[in-house]
Amino acid sequence: MVFQRLCESEGKVHLTFGHFQGEFPVLAETPDRVILGLTALERGQWGLKPGAHLTMTLSDRGLPYEAVVDFQGYGRLHGVEASHVSLPRVLRALDAHRLADYIPDRPVPCPFSDQQNNVKDGFITAFGEDGLELAPPEGVMNLGDLLRLNAQSSVELRAALGDPLALTVRVAYFGERVWGLRFVDTADPLLVGRYRQWLREALHRQAQRDRSRFSAGGMEGRNIPGKPQPILAPSAVRLLTDKDPLVLVLAEGEAFPVRLAESLGRKLGIATLDRGKGPLKPLLAGLGADETTWGRVRLVLVHHRVRGGSSLEWCRRLVEEEKCPLPILLMGTEEDAHLKRNRAVAAGAVDYLVGEPFHALRTLKALEDTLRMFA
């Protein structure tokens, strides 16, 4: 899945062969090899022959890895010169000491105390079994000004876990613009246990998303010159957290639905659909919808970034054209929230929620209140 993620993100790998080295784009992955944008001129300069061993380094979800691969030949992919290397048997982590078992899709807000016990607003960039990595507030140039090596701090994990949870940590190492914060030996074992249970669930959800997104048959990069553009198939519903009651999130892309699942997935099921114009109900067959029911879905949340029109237009279509009996909530920015709430209710929605800035507990309460109202 590492190379499929690199395909998606138009990422590169670094290759070393003798005294030659360079960075090359990942064009495709197949079940037995990786196809790289390494040209005939570069192959000739390096003197590469089938079976030659190369050292490969790459970054996946912000962590560096190293592997040894074999050069397997060359060819053209959609008219682009390409070289083939074997899939690595093992990717060796280069920073095995880091507290970074789980890398969230985006940094998670996290208040913490500095050396003078002042509360600052940091951002968690990685979670580990025994601690986490924390980035400082914007504008801080020297990490040691706030926390020195071995200094103690308290971190508030409410934004990540969804429930209040504070743990005492100490600075175990300095990373690239982050502190590595390890839980102190005297930390409450019950609180640490709650954190570790959440971490296991977060890793499981991330693995489920990976398995549902990626193909065992491999993947090609999206922007290979000369590659024919695919005919887009109808969008499918993706189940991010399999739990009842189930909330269906209509949004463009997966950034917001994934964030919602990470924040609220312990309490609610989250499914997502990125869909343009057209009836919604027929697309929910995988969630049990049929001619008479809407299946497992109990609430529809329409994000302000949605394809096929505005969130208000989506709401009107659901209410007027599809006669949707489910409660509908719209979500957007806090600018003119009162006016947007009036428009949402006029379009048939139950309410308008502020999602930027995003507050997990406030959103959870609004969703649970609405579900209870329509139970």
Image: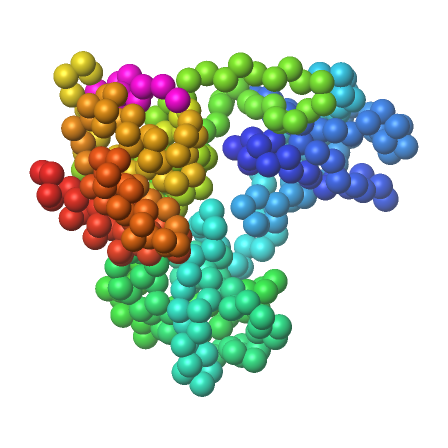
Residue positioned most to the right: 45
What residue is at 60 percent from the left and 31 percent from the top?
A: 7
What residue is at 70 percent from the left and 34 percent from the top?
A: 25
Looking at the image, which is closer to me, 363 or 217? 363
Looking at the image, which is closer to me, 150 or 104? 104
Rendering quarter of residue 163: bottom left
Rendering quarter of residue 78: top right
Looking at the image, which is closer to me, 263 or 85? 263
**Vertical placement of residue 87 versus 260, above or below:** above
Q: Which residues are magenta?
A: 277-289
**Vertical placement of residue 81 versus 299, above or below:** above
Q: Is residue 12 magenta?
A: no
The answer to whether residue 266 is visible is no
What residue is at 61 percent from the left and 45 percent from the top?
A: 59
Image quarter in which the C terminus is found: top left
**Vertical placement of residue 336 versus 26, above or below:** below
Q: Is residue 81 left or right of residue 213?
A: right
Q: Position of residue 123 (x, y in %)?
A: 46, 62
